[in-house]
Image (cartoon, coloured by chain):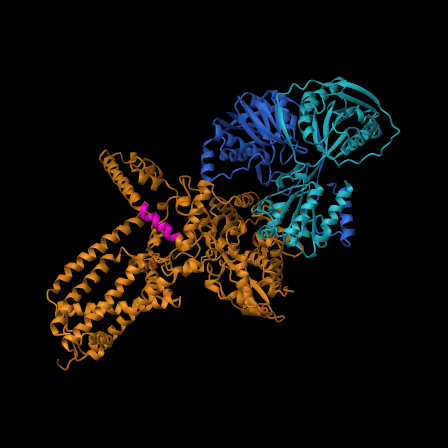
Amino acid sequence: MADMWVGVNGADEALRQVNAEMLGGARALADQAAAQVVAIVWGASAAGHAKALASWGADRVVIVESEAAPAPEAVARTLARLAAESAPAVVLLADGAESRVAAPLLAEALDAPLFSDVVDIEAGDEVFFTRLPYTAKVIERATAAAPTVVATVRPKALPVPEVDASRTAEVIAAPADAADLARIVQSVARAASERVDLAEADIVVAGGRGCKGPEGFAVIESLADALGAAVGASRPAVDEGWIDIQYQVGQTGKTVAPSLYIACGISGSIQHMAGMGASKCVVAINKDPEAEIFAGADYGIVADLFEAVPLLGAAVRERK
Amino acid sequence: MGEVPAREVLWNITGHWLIYPCFVAALAVAVVFFVRRWRLWKIGEPENRSDRRAERLRGAVRDALLQVKVAERRGPGLVHVAMYVAMIILLIATATVAAQADLGLPLVQGDFYLYFLSLTVDLAGAAFCIAMVACIVRRIANRALDTKPGDIVVLGLLLAIGVTGFVLEGLRIAGTGDPWSAWSPVGSLFAGLFASWDQGQIELAHRVLWWFHMALAFGLIAYWTYSKLVHVLLVPAGVYWRDLKPKGELPFIDMEDEGLLSFGCGRLEELTWKDLFDTQACVRCNRCQDLCPAFATGKPLSPKSFIQDLGAELEQRGPIIYRLQKEAAAQERNAADAAESEKASKAVPALPKAEALLENADLTDAERAIIDRPLVGAVIAPETLWACTTCGACMEACPAFVEHVPKVVKMRTYQVSMESAFPPEAQATFRNLENNGNPWGLGWQTRSKWAEGLDVPTIAEAPDAEYLYWPGCSGAFDARNRKVSAALVSLLAEAGVSFAILGNEEKCCGDAARRMGNEFVYFMLASENIATLQAYGVKKIIVQCPHCYQALARDYPQLGGHFEVIHHSELLARLVREGRLPRAREELGRVCFHDSCYLGRYQDVYEAPRAVVRAAGGSVVEMGRNRRASFCCGAGGGRMWLEESAGARINEARCAQALDTDPDLLATSCPFCLTMLADGMVSADSDVPVRDIAELLAGAEK
Amino acid sequence: MNIVVCVKQVVDTEAVIALDGAGEVELMGQTMVIDPYSEFAVERAVQLKEELGGTVTLLTLGSQDCLAAVRHGLAMGADAAVLIEDEQWTARDAAQAAALLAEAASTMGADLVMGGWKSGDTAAAQVMGRMAAIMRLPLANMATGLSVEGGTIVAECEVDDGVETARLPLPAVVAAQQGLAEPRYPSVRDVMRARRRGAEVRPVADFAAASKPTTVTVVSRELKSGRCGGRIVAGEAPVAVAETVRLLAEEAKVL
């Protein structure tokens, strides 16, 4: 059968873990189909990643001789040319801003189907892709009858493969296609220093009346910084003047739907729940075991936030 | 003098007939000013306020003639009644004198003369003068009264007329040596001042002063309808024209009328004539403002200023609109005549729409500036409009029966429906109501979840149920209020009441949408609810939310939905009375009861919830502001869904009032009040529990 | 400035999703709304029109039922609408949809083609990108800001670690992300005005792309159980926190 391709952004010296996850997934597919796993890697540090990619399961590593940080359009063009030459069964890309541009362009160039934000890949007679449409309320398994299928893979969804340092891969180089871009990037504002915007944040740490004062929000902010999260607040905390109204989450504040919402010292009035109920995962920290917030939380910690939140921050920093 | 007590009328006065032409002239001036006012309110939209005459007359007798509502406020109210009575007595006396002088009726003699015309009138006059002095002092001393120069002029004029009257009487007594002067004690006191004067001096002074006294009186008559004294005419008229519709009922807007191009009031003349009349009937007595929860907590809203500001705009805009309307009507008549003569009556060109009328009118720049300025924004600040909780305390207090709240809602309706201008946080609520039929936007299919495990049938499962139980959005979705629903369900089951719910087919009643001015969303919700209820043949509905009560019982009939609605407080009180629910399971201690505006002032239900509290073992303690004067929790009129950034929080103010009663418990019977007061208690760092009366009766208070 | 905005009608995001016997998502009885990402695009397009003049035309692939979303967009201030009427539209995959929309948009003389970077329902997240490829236009994806400067646009686009500002020549494709614009709430006046601007309905059969076959087969759908809530992680704070972090990483996979 045709090969299983994994597109890898090798711009940074360290590879993101999602690349390992994709290679693990591709490896499983390849093993089932007696096919090869090919990693296509581009970017400034591309050449240095061959060993790691092999250890995660790549049989062949194609190093694209691209500029340091090729535009997604250029990545799509190079991948399209390479894929047109060798017709892989599957091309996996890590879901993210780059692949959200590159994958549709690639798929269209190959006249291929595209499954975006895939959370599981199964090998069978065909390759099955699992997605979570309808704001993650539906689990959908789909397959496509096409020579090449493109998919973007959600980070942290597939299992991390075991590292086999003894594995080696054939390393070849490939030229990059010219960018020839109409879109000229003028500047990139890194969000590292500034805290993420509340409405669009992937993680939100919110404080309520339990914060007891502006000092309490220092604790909340510290956890938010550890997580790269936005800070939110319930209305009572805003009313008390502990934090500005722009941070208010709820019926009369902002509506948020992050992957993770950590509610600290928030009682969980329906007015608040209306603003964060669509969050994918909710953690509640409250010292009152009767607090209504627990009914709407995936994980509840009955504890004083001044004790639990710093512990949580420390644990998160430790993981990183 | 003879044996029959009497006095000579018009002593020392010649040519008194002159007063009649003067009187007519003064009256003519008053009529001119009155017509000017009448023209102003005439520019408003038509509305029938002349039906049910007997009821209107009864109301006018009670609250205008007998001043019952005026007297409700002790202090200034009673002083006003005293002034009013004294003024009537003085008027009768004057009329009597005139009747004798010019009709030859021998009235000024005998016991009637002694007891009434002398003694009573003398004392009434004294009381009147003292009251005037007191009023002037109060107006000057009390800065909060918003005193205008005109107020002092009116009082000063009245006082001057009173004092000159007494001086005249003193001169007459001194000049005639009146043997019955003892019956005019105050007049006699004044007579003492002139004891040393000779007859010539007295007569001259008397004659001059008499004409001066008359000049003041005629001046007052001429000034009457120009000044605030016009309230003598307008307030009784306003009382007669009071709103007899069920309380809280808003004007019906037919959303299915495709010809309707504008909703609500965006221009002053889109208010009704009665609305505009109200702005003139207001005497700035401050009763509304004193009771307004928004004003009390520092919001940019005073119901009095709201009415006064509309009145001030009417003074400027009214005459221009009156002229334009008159011109348009003349054009229409000409067009109709022309059409008649051509016998082509079908081809009458449509009357230019009001908007076009204004756009095309020939106006000076100054007039154009007045005509083009928007009602909300230039006359009424948006913050003012949106600060109102529609609690109705202002209307309940107003002795002139001014209707503040409907004006607020009509103006909001225009702002939302036509301008899409409203506090930004309301948008989520509107969308949630549209898409999911509840203000929080929770999936509509999850509405009936609260009833899981409670053994509550849906009406589809139990079509023969006597009652439909309507938990409302709060009772169905809000975790706190779900406990109230559960308590109520257990009580209904215990009492053997046959009931069922609509389940997921229920939608928000639409009260908040309507009172926030979103008539369109209200109409969608209400018509769907009515269709559902009618499809199941529902006759009787139990509600636990007074806002649902208002919508289902008072708003829905306008859309053809007629149901017998009962609030859970009324039903529970009845079930207790009938012995179907046991009384006091334990002693609850001091239970402070908070009246919901929409149950109390809107539905006049005050005693039923208190009876339930007592049945539950509580001894009811009252806040100073209770029943008709209750202080809103801050959530009414859609305020539940808006930010409260200006001033202090209303719910916290109410909780402070409750805590002053040293309660063991704070009870209410409205889900919004429950939420707001529970919140307020947390802010106040108080552990006084806040409970719904159903929870108390169900013994769930621990 | 002539802006074409692709608008999709979707199930309300708060809706409780149910599947029918065939495993399809049940749409009967559901509240259907304009897709929130489409709505961001419509709002910004209307704002640009109000600033610079021009027209905003909505483009929708769907059945007559989808006209509700179209009317909403018109009430927001769009000038005209085209509906590619297709009773089978829900069965079309993203590649087919993109082909149809691109074919229609190509005939509309657009300076700017806008739409949502994904949709709230199927979240295929590729239609705008594919349209850009088909129409050979530059793409600004996940735009949170958009302005017009002369013959070019400047778009702020969300990238993984921040915001990238880029200049694109016109014509171009812009895919909206949350934050691009705060959608307005149309007044009844707007709604009534929109009634007079109906949609031009063009049968799908008139398009060459209608014959493009699908390659995608959905094998199964099942409902993901929602948050049941109320799960308390036991133990004193240090223990509970450590366990929660583990669960977040391994079970919820959000860390």
Q: Residue C15: x, y in percent?
A: 62, 42
Q: Residue B59: x, y in percent?
A: 35, 63
Residue that lies at the very extreme toward the front in this rendered image? B196
Q: Quadrant of residue B355?
A: top left
Q: Quadrant of residue B688?
A: bottom right
In the image, the chain rendered in cyan is A
Looking at the picture, tell me which residue is in the foreground, B294 or A11.
Answer: A11
Residue A109 visible here: yes
In the image, the chain rendered in blue is C
**In screen coordinates, is A215 left or right of A32?**
left
**In screen coordinates, is A70 left or right of B440?**
right
Secondary structure of the magenta portion, mostly? helix
State the extent of the magenta-drawn residues as a range: B306-316
Magenta stretch holds residue C74 = no
Q: Residue B340: x, y in percent?
A: 24, 36
In the image, the chain rendered in orange is B
Query: Where A31 falls versus C19 (above or below)?
Result: above
